[in-house]
Image: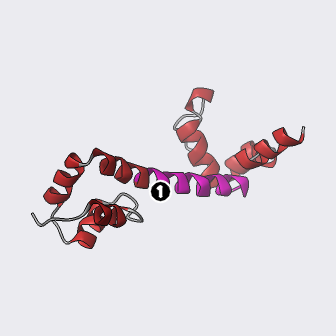
Amino acid sequence: MKKISKKRIIKAIEGSHGIKLTVIQKLGITLKELNDLLQKYPDLKCLVKEEKSNVLDFGESKLLKAVENGEPWAIKFLLLNQGQSRGYGNRDFKTEELREKFSEVVINFISPRDHEEKKKEG
């Protein structure tokens, strides 16, 4: 395996969204070589995980925006995936039923940012 500086590896990981194929293409190495480097430098393995986590955070923020905008598909997705402890299961809601059932939830929804601002105000 050719010698690659840690700095160059970091640069390749940053902006890769944690996708190893992107990293190996930037570095011109094989997947095995990348995995060997990640074993050698555990902090780089953490950086790959952090990149993946950032993508997930971005996706969650877009989902919350869709919920705030009253998008029925987003409300359904959120409740089915994160609302199971409150009794929401794999029931197949129709779009109109979602609008009726959850319109009040959407109207009264306070985003995390708004919640923090309200806490500061009062």
- Pinpoint residue 108: horizontal percent, then vertical percent: 81, 44
Residue closest to the eye, 35 or 105: 35
Secondary structure mostly seen in the magenta stretch: helix
- Pinpoint residue 77: horizontal percent, then vertical percent: 56, 47
Q: How is the image coloured?
A: secondary structure
Q: Which residue is labeled 1 in the image?
A: 55
- Pinpoint residue 74: horizontal percent, then vertical percent: 61, 52
Identify the residue at image location x=42%, y=55%.
51
Residue at the limit of the structure toward the left, as seen here: 1
- Pinpoint residue 15: horizontal percent, then vertical percent: 42, 65
Identify the residue at image location x=23%, y=66%.
24
In this rendering, the answer to whether 85 lies above or below 3 is: above
Mark 1 element type: helix
Question: Image quadrant for the C terminus?
Answer: top right
> The disc labelled 1 sits on which kind of residue?
Val
Residue 60: within the magenta?
yes
Residue closest to the eye, 105 or 60: 60
In this rendering, the answer to whether 33 lies above or below 103 is: below
Can residue 100 be seen here? The reply is no
Span colored in magenta: 52-70
Can residue 81 be seen here? The reply is yes
103 lies left or right of 38: right
How would you rate the neighbour count of disc 1 (Cα within 10 Å): few for under 14, some for 14-19, many for 20 or more?
some
